[in-house]
Image: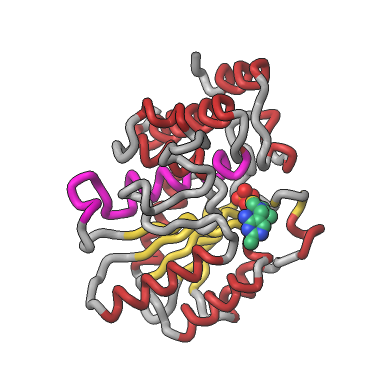
Amino acid sequence: MTELEQHALNIRKNILTMVYTAQSGHPGGSLSAADILTSLYFEEMDINKDNVASQDRDRFVLSKGHITPGYYATLCEKGFIPKEELKTFRQLHSPLQGHPNMNYIEAVDMSTGSLGQGISAAVGMALANRLDKNDHRIYFLLGDGESEEGEVWEACMAAGHYKLDNLCGILDYNHLQIDGNIADVVGPEPFPEKFEAFGWHVVEVDGHDFESLAKGFEEARNTKGQPTMIIAHTIKGKGVSFMENNYKWHGSAPNQEQYEAAMKELGGE
Ligand SMILES: Cc1ncc(C[n+]2csc(CCOP(=O)(O)OP(=O)(O)O)c2C)c(N)n1
Ligand SMILES: [Mg+2]
């Protein structure tokens, strides 16, 4: 197993344990984004314990703010959150609320949860970096269901207009949102043509393949005069067979039997 695979596996196990312990939270979209988050935090982004308090580092906005199990598990794997604290997920007074709060966790760069707002904040951060002549990059993770929010396209229009080549989005293209298939709810496809029409460079990658993800990030870094959207093809619930491609696991917690079966599949205790 490679180092990245090991990180992603630890993240997946912690996602399940957090949602099981809290008996609430969002496993499906956390599991679909686990490899993207691993690639971002362990390969792509310039962020670590030494520079977290500084302006001189890359920034990340979790626009699909409901996948805190995946986000907190990644920040824990990176050393920003103590493992013990994961047990307090979604408890009253815990810093680990159901949606991320930048006032509670130093490594969280934007409070999110209301879909559509995170991408807008990321566009503002990219503009601010340009004004400050700060050449660090801004990344954000967008849900495919989230793209059904009109605000997403206003933000895309602004980023294209201002040619924000320090901005890189990753679309978690798992085809499902809370109520079923995105195409059946308010079909936002086709994605590549839409982002291109808004002035973005588009790269398509396999969101569960670290090499493919790394190539996408490299292409984004090398793209000048345009923001880049990495369309990551993913599977909602990836890694736990009975959760895969099933929207019912968008925001449901496993019972004890399901938790044990899921951990066994991941090779856990
Ligand atoms: C403005 C707003 N409307 C509705 C919701 C409720 N909600 C939370 S997650 C979700 C579906 C999101 O689907 P998607 O973006 O595809 O997420 P993923 O599949 O990656 O979990 C909805 C409707 C919300 N958080 N914000
Ligand atoms: Mg989705």
Residue 193, position in %: x, y?
A: 63, 74
Q: Which residues are magenta?
A: 28-53
Residue 30 position by quadrant: top right
Q: Is residue 223 above or below residue 157?
A: above
256 vs 87, left or right, is right
Q: Nearer the viewer, residue 31 or 225?
A: 31
- Identify the residue shown where x is 53% and y is 23%: 266
- Identify the residue shown where x is 65% and y is 73%: 150
- Identify the residue shown where x is 56% and y is 20%: 263
Q: How is the image coloured?
A: secondary structure
Look at the image and tell me in which quarter the N terminus lies.
top left
Q: Is residue 256 above or below residue 97?
A: above
Inspect this view and state whether residue 145 appears.
no
Any magenta on residue 11? no
Residue 208, position in %: x, y?
A: 52, 43
Q: Main secondary structure of the magenta part?
A: helix
Residue extending farthest left: 50
In this rendering, the count of numbered labels is 0
Residue 172, position in %: x, y?
A: 57, 54
Inspect this view and state whether residue 187 appears.
yes
- Identify the residue shown where x is 67% and y is 42%: 250
Residue 257, position in %: x, y?
A: 67, 16
135 vs 176, left or right, is left
Residue extending farthest right: 184
Residue extending farthest bottom: 161
Any magenta on residue 40? yes
Residue extending farthest front: 93
